[in-house]
Amino acid sequence: MKHPTVNRRTFASAAALGAVSLAFPALRAQGKLEKTKLALAVGGKAAFYYLPLTITEQLGYFRAEGLDVEISDFAGGARALQAVVGGSADVVSGAYEHTINLQSKNQMFQAFVLQGRAPQIAFGVSTKNMPNYKTVADLRGKKIGVSAPGSSTNMMANLVLSRAGIKPADVSFIGVGTAAGALAALRSGQIDAMSNTDPVMTMLEQKGEVKIISDTRTLKGTVDVFGGPMPAACLYAPMDFVQKNPNTCQALANAIVHGLKWLQTAGPGDIIKTVPDNYLLGDRGLYLASFNKVRDAISLDGIISDEAAKTALKALASFDPSIKADKIDLSKTYTNEFARRAKDKFKA
């Protein structure tokens, strides 16, 4: 299910841009923005996976950096990526591992600010459809819900299945989105298991509708599943875009890091006041329980660690034969240049 298609934050005129630069003198310390109007694609914006993006947008931090960002929301990260590949968006808010996948297909994309330092994905089995579930091997031939085929939720499911000797072709993956559609798909029995994000997975877990079999919503759970730290949501774009628009990428990184800094001290009540009502999926209590569960998965400073990038490559290569670890130049899949500058800007 798709969420509201577009969130617009539009400046009425160049005069408004001038007003913003007067209100935020720090803009002048940075080079002139190559692009002020940007199209950003995201897959499943209501998920906690993208909470830093929502906070940054809702609190006006993109505007504070002189940016007019139009956000289009898709059913999953793979669809959001298609928007950039197809030219209808400039930047993706999506899973870091897509940059590795793309490089294996000779498409150079680069992540430039991290939002999540753990994937925040849980894999659960339907207690209704599979009451006698015992091991991952029981999932052979089953229908597994993911946000969208090819997305990070799909990748994690593939990793878990591969450890039980189950290939992607041995199951059926069904795109269910990351919100109400995902809840409905599991509750109606359309799928037997689901790999998805919060708040959806916590809601199903607390009501006893899924049995969680693999969990990366915490740093510890991530190390258990992936064997090390694993980067999650980030802003990434074609390398060509990053090279041609360094000041614009810096402004985007500044805005996201500003949002990350706000999140470090925000209480549950602050989150409720800031996110749109429909993100709560009709249950404030469960939404807040979900937030507490994923809180330590949110990046502190937007920086991608070298170790985390290596974990991502190792994980992808373990189940995807098209990804040859020795052929991937990880140094080209991300840069911390912008996040480090943003971190310095918001030190105080």
Image (cartoon, rainbow, N blue to C red):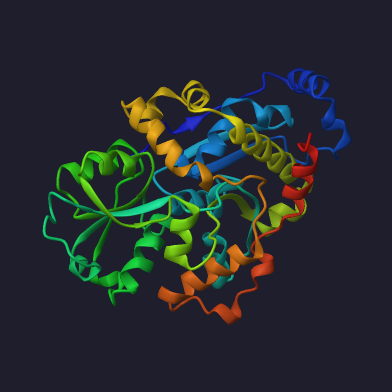
Q: Is residue 254 left or right of residue 193?
A: right
The residue at the point 87 percent across, 31 percent down is 28
Residue 98, given in percent of the width and then of the height, sits at 52, 60
Q: Nearer the viewer, residue 253 or 347?
A: 347
Q: Residue 334's spot in the image, x, y percent?
A: 66, 60
Question: Residue visible at 72% across and 27% down?
Answer: 64
Q: Residue at x 71, y 20 (%)?
A: 13
Would you say residue 56 is visible in this rendering? no
- Of the 4 image quadrants, the one containing the N terminus is top left
Residue 253: name its quadrant: top right
Q: Is residue 201 visible?
A: yes
Q: Nearer the viewer, residue 147 or 289?
A: 289
Determine whether 139 is above or below 70 in the image: below
Position above or below: 165 against 193:
below
Residue 345 vs residue 95: left or right?
Answer: right
Q: Position of residue 10 (x, y in %)?
A: 62, 24
Q: Is residue 7 above or below residue 158?
A: above
Q: Quadrant of the C terminus?
A: top right
